Image: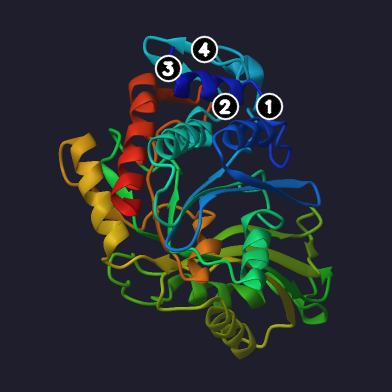
Amino acid sequence: MSEVLNLTKELILRPSITTDDAGCQLLIAQRLQRAGFRCEHLRFGEVDNLWATHGEGEPTLVFLGHTDVVPPGPREAWTSDPFVPEIRDGVLYGRGAADMKGSVAAFVIALERFVAAHPQHRGRVALLLTSDEEGDAIDGVRRVADVFRERGEQIDWCVTGEPSSKAKLGDLLRVGRRGTLSATLLVRGIQGHVAYPEKARNPIHQAMPALAELAARRWDDGYESFPPTSLQISNINAGTGANNVIPGELRVLFNLRYNPNWRAAQLEHECETVLRAHGLDYQVQWHRGGEPFFTPEGPLRATAREVLATFAGDAPEESTGGGTSDARFIAPLGAQCIEIGPVNASIHKVDEHVSVADLEALPELYLALIGRMLL
């Protein structure tokens, strides 16, 4: 059994449901220390973060990942125990197999092999792991990035192992991500009897035109390889449950996924301008999940394209699609960020899995990337 398969299985055995690392990072740190890495444990609140480095000076190439996983859901829905790795027909099953314990294991194996073969490599190679990517992402990489900023820590290139491939390993290269901005909106009215609307003020009726305007707005026409900015209303709640009571409050949740045409503060201003224009009595709480980032053409992107083409057989699609990742916290430090990982078809699903062949190819893929950037 290969090293990467063994390590992935060891990690899956640890039920590291966010934000509990369940010992994954300690296991990895012990391995990397034996390989000559300096390991620093950065714990904030209930979140574990590991920063492991090898070498000195510039440039710095960082591999970024997370050891936490989403809950498995009903265990009886799984064909086998989600935290007992099982191979069936050349496929490894288990929670985190694809997202992203397989990539983390591949990082470790690639790093061990690289420093063993090239102990005097130029610059630094590093691994940054968190147990708070699938959760609120407050005390994970976001917090570590603040520490790096205070230290003046320089990161030139960052490779995130999020499962990005679509049909086969290496067929997609993620070169950016949209920003995410969430709102919890409270619209206040006056409760009353539906037969006497003149004595009440219906917050649903008042809010509908404003919400319709926000939902229908064309925010922009996209940005390079980014799609247009989108606002989606995800929840609306009001009323007492009775059909003869005008509610006193309306609560609305909505989210914007936006491209580099915008920053969160600008979108907040635009949305509140609409709410005020419709005369609403409201309050809104904003949560800035992360600004968009984009890696233009340069050494990292060009090298990754060449490496992926050798594994996939064709040049990869270069995309900024999908949700978001922890790279959104590293990019503002001045780093060029890309994402390369296994096929993402099963992530967060029952019977999450990764092809054993893809898993065993991943360390060589990452090793080729390191070699081209640091040798």
Q: Which residue is mark 2?
A: 95
Among the two numbered marks 4 and 1 on one chain, the one whose residue lies closer to the N terminus = 1
Which circle marks residue 86 in the picture?
4
Q: Secondary structure at mark 4?
A: strand
The kind of residue on which mark 4 rests is Glu
Distance of label 4 from label 1 (alpha carbons): 15 Å
Q: Which residue is mark 3?
A: 2
Among the two numbered marks 1 and 3 on one chain, the one whose residue lies closer to the N terminus = 3
> Residue at 52% of width from left, 67% of height from top?
154
The kind of residue on which mark 1 rests is Pro
Locate residue 126, reporting x and y percent.
51, 49
Mark 3 vs mark 4: in front: 3
Quick check: 28 above or below 78?
below
Left or right, 115 with reference to 16: left
The kind of residue on which mark 2 rests is Arg
Q: Are marks 3 and 4 in contact (CB under 8 Å)?
A: no
